[in-house]
Image (spheres, rainbow, N blue to C red):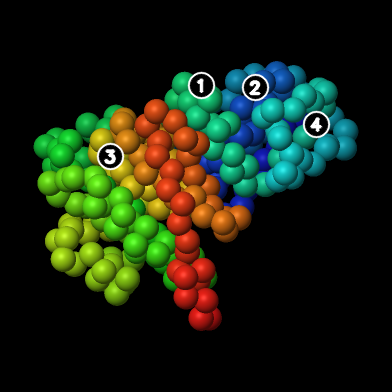
Amino acid sequence: MTVQVIYEGRFGNNLLQYVCGRLFAERWGLHLEATLPKNDILYATPNAPGTKFSGSPRVLRDGVNVLDDKFTPGPYVLWGYWCQSRWYEAARQKILSFIRIPAVEAANERGLVSDRDLCMHVRLGDYVPARAMIQPEWYDAILDTEKHERLYIVTDTPDHPYLDHWKARKPTIVSRNPASDFHFMRQFKRIICSNSTFCWWACFFSHAYRIHTYRGTDMMQFSMSEGPRNVIHDGKLIREVDPRP
């Protein structure tokens, strides 16, 4: 063996883990044993060939700068979430070369949305019991400055009362299935990204010219780096605003 990847979490996390492992292996010319876990959203091209090494592997965990530091040839196990957005933004063209994803035009019907429309992602589901939802006022501050014709809210829990906060804005709620929702978000030129790696990747693979991302104090949070198309906003989670269990 040479480079192995330990997968934890769901699609967004798994894609981070695979991409990090592949970038690491290709940087040092090592054989990558990992494959991208099966999903209905995208797939990877075959791994590049690399040198194989045997022996006891060195285990690299979160906190190690796996794509910054220097490493000697040998077997490795990458075991972490690898939430360093700057790594992936810097390697965007390389990542696009080994990830196959439908063209935005093929993902949904043409003409469904326009450049004047705004997409907003709200992750609820497993975030509700953890009280990890972003406070609604964080979204409001962005909505008030991003002038738009129609607002689309993409969510995993379309009937949750949390969404009632935006009833007056008359949004279109979108919640079909992970693959459809992912590609739907990719169509927009402006996206408000939640504290979710699923949405982060949809933004990454989009042609949006402005992406608003969340930056909080919680260690779970993963936002894009400040850049030409990325605007980062400080915010708090529900549990930080209202600490009731």
| Mark 1 or mark 2: whose residue is earlier in sequence | 2
User: Secondary structure under badge 4?
Assistant: loop
Does 63 sit above or below residue 29? Answer: below
- Looking at numbered disc 4 in the image, what kind of residue is underneath it? Pro
Q: Which one is earlier in the sequence, the residue at label 3 or at label 4?
A: 4
Dot 3 amino acid type: Arg
Q: Which numbered circle lies on residue 26? A: 2
Residue nearer the viewer, 141 or 126: 141
Marks 2 & 4, CB-CB < 8 Å contact: no
Say which of marks 1 and 4 sits in front. Answer: 1
* Residue 83 lies in quadrant: top right
* x and y percentages locating residue 231 in the rendered image: 40, 39
Residue drawn at x 47%, y 61% is 236
Q: Secondary structure at mark 2?
A: helix
Quarter of the figure that contains the N terminus? top right
Please tell me which of labels 3 and 1 falls first in the chain: 1
Q: Is residue 57 left or right of residue 215?
A: right
In depth, the one of 42 and 158 nearer the eye is: 158
Whole-Å distance between the Cαs marked 3 and 2? 33 Å
The image quarter containing residue 56 is top right
**Dot placed on the residue nearer the N-terminal end, 2 or 4:** 2
Disc 1 marks which residue? 94
Who's the residue at 48% across and 26% down the image?
92
User: Considering depth in this image, is 122 or 209 the residue closer to the camera?
Assistant: 209
| Label 3 or label 2, whichever comes before in sequence order | 2
Q: Is residue 153 visible?
A: yes
Label 3's element?
A: strand
Residue corresponding to mark 4: 75
Cα distance between the residues tagged 2 and 4: 13 Å
Labelled pair 1, 2 in contact (Cβ < 8 Å): yes
